[in-house]
Image (cartoon, rainbow, N blue to C red):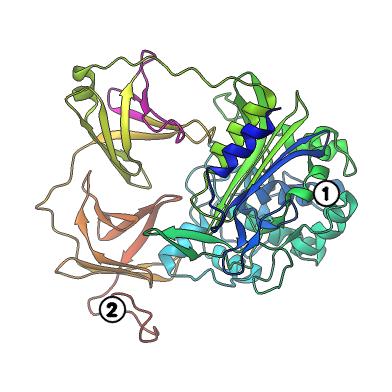
Amino acid sequence: MDTDAIAQLVSRFASPTGPGLAVGVYRGGVLVTQATAGLASVEFGVPIDERTRFDIASMSKQFAATAVLLLARDGLVSLDDDIRAHLPELRLEAPVTIAQCLQHTGGLREWLALAAIAGRSLTRITQDQTLEFVSGLSTLDFLPGTAFRYSNTGYVLAASLVHRVTGRTLGEFAAERIFRPLGMHRTLFREDSRAVLPEFAYGYESVDDRVLRADSEECAVGDGGLVTSLSELGAWFRFLRDGDILGEDIRDTLVDSTPVFPDGSIGPYAYGVYHADLGDERTIGHAGAVAGYRSHLSYLPDQDLGIVVLANHSAVPATVIANAVARLAAGVAEPAVPAPALDAGSARTAAGWWIMRGADESMRTEARLDGTLDLSGFQSGRFTLAEDGCWYGDDREEGLRLLINGDRLVLGVDMRPGRDLTFERCTGPDASATPPAGTYLSPELGTLAIIEPDGRFRLGLEIAGEIEPGPDHTFRIGPASVRRDGDDLLLGIFGADAVRFLRQPEGTTLVGVPRGLDTAS
């Protein structure tokens, strides 16, 4: 293993005076190589080391799923149970099983996207408050069990399930049943964002070349919220190898329970872990991203090799680094770059507007004279046609690719298996289109959307500005898109399709909002 190359790789992504990262390589569940760079606290100049604890964001999901599997083994729940049987306050329009919550196959709308629409602050939001918010949702994005769409909602419901069934929070249950048995005594679910945690890395982001604090302040967990360090995770890799301590049955269910869809295809996601390939090597693992933190865990079972990247800076590409370290540690060659097949005619044919139905996310492809494509909108970058018929992004680390076939465009991300997104060709924006002025209410969110006759738009407390025509007869404002549906509006945002807003009587206005919280005033 080229430890010097790993150290040089890590040093590229941090300065000695800024936030940074920790990278660990494990064999046989033992931390055999580590490389750290940067500071856990920029303010106090505290360096990152193998004991520095990070918020690992969605990398936490495998631990939350393990807690639910322990409940199933105890006979307290069945993975085939309708989640509503244990959380009867949920108003979901169709049964969603516990398994579907954990596999992202339940059609559950993304609660984080809906919280943004509703202006619901995540600062110190509790598990009970999150459940209350999610309990107002009834509409699903697709029939449960028929598709895969990543949604954090299933995992906050899993945390609430543990609490409802056991009377203990997920943090308390996991400490007793997972972390203490494994010897992970400094690993915990951060259920109080105010808690003082020794050796905890502050979170940061960069804005206009300035490094700013960007700590996650949620108190709801399950979809994220786990705090751990390189020094703690060896025991977890021993569990992923053979079920050490917690049981082979738990390990096998966690890792091997990938869903089978009605068309016979198999999904890439089991319970809190993705399945993917790195060259000829099988991998399982998960990434994490939240304000101020990035993470990635990979396990290569055929080599009993584990890789962890933990960072306290939002700009650190944890998955890119994890894959590069895994290649160095496992001796996996870099993937071959498909030969380019520049063709100005193909670029002109591929040019146009594209829309993702439901969420109404859109992109535009524009042909360049050199035969490449410029992509803008939902994703951006320059793409080159290859001999295999795919368009590949010039930024190879991003791993973006486009497959365009007539009026259909599939956007793929190499490092996020199973999350290819389909867009359809559509008409471009109509500059003469008039926004549907009026006041609209979402019954599920209890949130008003107001479109003024002059085009000013207000949505809850967070989204405000000038509404503009979008493609396919939509209108866009910030991260959201709206379209008319009779007298109503359908609002789309990535993670939540076609949220219905009902037209309200003339003169309806925001009420009960303290001065200064209405960002459009």
User: Residue most toward the left?
Assistant: 432
Residue 480 at x, y percent in the picture: 34, 56
Amino acid type for the residue under numbered disc 2: Thr
Q: Quadrant of residue 363?
A: top left
Q: Is residue 386 above or below residue 232?
A: above
Q: Nearer the viewer, residue 141 or 395?
A: 395
Q: Is residue 315 above or below residue 34?
A: below
Amino acid type for the residue under numbered disc 1: Leu
Residue 168 at x, y percent in the picture: 80, 66
For label 1, the SS is helix
The residue carrying mark 2 is 508
Residue 214 as seen in the image, left or right of residue 389? right
Please tell me which residue is depicted at 79% across the width and 61% down the height of the picture: 165
- Earlier in the chain: of badge 2 and badge 1, it is 1
Distance between the alpha carbons at the discs numbered 2 and 1: 50 Å
The residue carrying mark 1 is 70
Query: Can residue 313 be seen at all in this image of the molecule?
Result: yes
Tally of numbered discs: 2
> Which disc, if any, is residue 160?
none
